[in-house]
Amino acid sequence: MIARKMAALLAAAALVLTGCGTGTGTGGTGTPDPAGELTVALQFPPRADYAFDADDGARLQSLGVAETLTTVDADARPAPMLATAWEQQGNAWRVTLRQGVRFHDGTPLTPEAVVTALRYVAGVEAPPRAIRGIGFAVTPDGADAVRITTTEPDPVMPLRLSSGNLGILAPAAYAGGGAPRYLRTATGPFVLDSVSGADSAQLVRNDDYWGEPAGAARVTVRYVEDPQARALAIQSGDVQFAEGLPQAQLDQVRSAGAEVVEYPNARTVPLQLNQSAKPFDDLRVRQAVTAAIDRPVLARQVLAGGAAPAADLFGAAVPWGETAPPPGADVARARQLLAEAGYTEQNPLTVRLWTFPNRPELPALANAIQAMLASAGVRVEITVGNYDAQEPKVLAGDYDMFLNSRSYLSDYPDAASTLTSDYTCDGSYAIDHYCSPAYDALVDRLGTTVDPAARQQLFRAAAAMLTRDAVGVMVVHPLNTAVLRGATGFVPDPLQIRPVLPQLSPTTG
């Protein structure tokens, strides 16, 4: 079953890939030149000087500089990285380390080095979310392993260890006190040679790397937050790779000869409906809103193909996601359900829809949803405002509809955190104010389920229950984009765990 599902997942992902080239990855038609250099434009700069206890740890991971004990495979299951094996023993995991690994400063990877790194990040004032609040502790366990314990038995520790915030640096990085020194102290296929604040960084190939060597001898990383500037950099030839270009820029870069790759993103745009008050405490009204919204049209026309229509919470980025498209609008059914709930032409329904402009697709989707609901007799008043001002009100239940954008994976590729925080009765981010004892009981089973396939079955069951109970409308799953011109080898990673840059090679010809 999992194998068939994964085949369907890869097929679905392949449908959104364009501009495929030669080699093991995607993009580029020239000959790979491993001795050459690349310049790349990335959209998210470091916000906290590459601090591991902030999200910057994931940036060092994506650059191919820092490595974690585990990674994940295409089935979103834990796979070896700096660790080669792991075994659960009650509330502990014994993690066996890879032999022959050396840090960029030449020192060997040892259990003591791993303990130093993980104790540092677990001991900061605000530990990474991947290990926060679980009683995480680590000690050496013989000459080739570490022992990780938690307050309660933890079924997903190998997945937690793939979080970019848990990268392992050499002992010297921590010797001076304060934040660890990240230059030339990691283990990855690239050495971080120098940085210029949040503007740029220089990477050089690690010729002593334990695994597959990086595809370029040197990479200049430029952090370019403006998407138009990233597009212009590709068009001018200033960079050979860029990420995160919106649909409006894709035709521009294609016309310049660039290869464009679009691939699934583990993110959903939900239209959240406040079940703690009228009118959305009535299942029929929630079902009517769902029936009135044409999700395939929103993805194909409003977002110009820059998203996939969402059939449930999870999409093609994960092997347990639903890849079949949802149905189109059924306005007659929507009107019937509204009439059954007491809303007719004589007693029309008027609701408030809030959203925010930080993600530019949201206001456009809100306007289209307003028009679709109008065809079913629902009057929608739209407010586009500041998210920080809106969040306290939506969490308190002082709203009607909220068009949001939400990653359904937290800091490692497991959905338990989102399913718990967003939809359980006591969830910390329960914007829909959904409360179902049956749902809570289902999600509680994740706390004792270790087998990845069994966990993924529970994820599917939870998503199906949310769909059955019309817990908001899962509108679309946005796509990621990557653009190459003068580079090749890009391999899409919808889970955004595996490093991006080491796979790239400059091309000649």
Image (cartoon, rainbow, N blue to C red):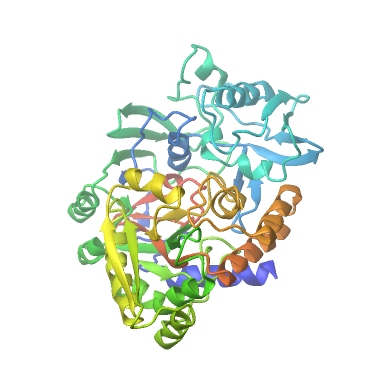
Q: Does residue 283 sit above or below 390 in this rendering? A: below
Q: Nearer the viewer, residue 299 or 317?
A: 299
Is 184 situated above or below 215? Answer: above
Q: Position of residue 42 (x, y in %)?
A: 33, 45
Q: Quadrant of residue 74?
A: bottom right
Residue at 48% from the left image edge and 45% from the top image edge = 499
In the image, taking residue 212 as reference, residue 440 lies left or right, namely right
The residue shown at (52%, 51%) is 430
Identify which residue, 268 or 225, lies in the foreground: 268
Please state which of residues 208 and 398 is positioned toward the viewer in this rendering. Answer: 398
The C terminus - image quarter: bottom left
Seen as rendered, the residue at the extreme front is 346
Task: List x then y, in percent, for residue 131.
Answer: 61, 35
> Residue 134, image x and y in percent?
66, 34
Q: Quadrant of residue 154?
A: top right
Relative to 475, 169 lies left or right: right
Residue 308 visible in the shown view: yes
Q: Looking at the image, which residue is at 66% across and 60% down?
A: 439
